[in-house]
Amino acid sequence: MVMPLRTATEDSVELLDPTHEQDPAGFAPPARLTTLKSTTIGVISNGKENTKPFFDHIERLLRDRHGVAKVIRRIKTNYSAPAQHELLAEAMGWDAVLAGVGD
């Protein structure tokens, strides 16, 4: 189930709710960031070929348009499996996380 949490405009980012429709009980999204300025954003890639140029572009946009202070990029050890526990533990220290796939 993908439901927009906020409508995108030229100066905003559209957020999608990745909650699985069969088990939404007990899930509450974290409070939204009021700004991306001076934040640390993590980017978790599945490591496939086309993720690098895509996330290069996203990183430029985050820094140049939104004032993100730090972008931390990580690649999962297995593109078809969930992110490893150590990576998820590291992500707990980030202000927000983007996860993406590419083929």
Image (cartoon, rainbow, N blue to C red):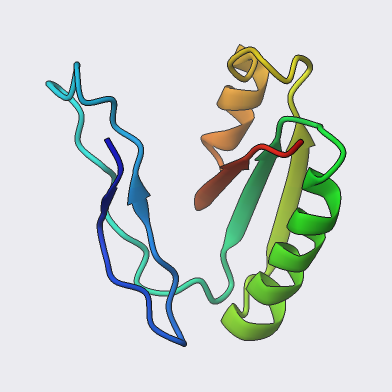
Q: Position of residue 66 (x, y in %)?
A: 58, 79
Q: Position of residue 73 (x, y in %)?
A: 76, 45
Q: Residue furthest front?
A: 103
Evaluate whether residue 94 shows in this view.
Answer: no
Residue at position x 43%, y 78% in the image: 12
The percent position of residue 30, horizontal first and vertical second, equals 29, 45
The quarter in which the C terminus is drawn is: top right
Is residue 23 or residue 64 the one in the foreground?
23
Q: Is residue 44 left or right of residue 75?
A: left
Relative placement, left or right, of 50 versus 94 is: right
User: Which residue is found at the position 28% from the left and 25% from the top?
Assistant: 20
Residue at x 50% of width, y 51% of height = 96
Name the quarter where the N terminus is drawn.
top left
Horizontal side of 18 relative to 91 (left or right) equals left
Answer above or below: position of 6 versus 71: below
Tell me what residue is drawn at x 54 percent, y 76 percent: 37
Front residue of this view, candidates 102 and 65: 102
Q: Position of residue 7 (x, y in %)?
A: 29, 71
Q: Is residue 83 left or right of residue 27?
A: right
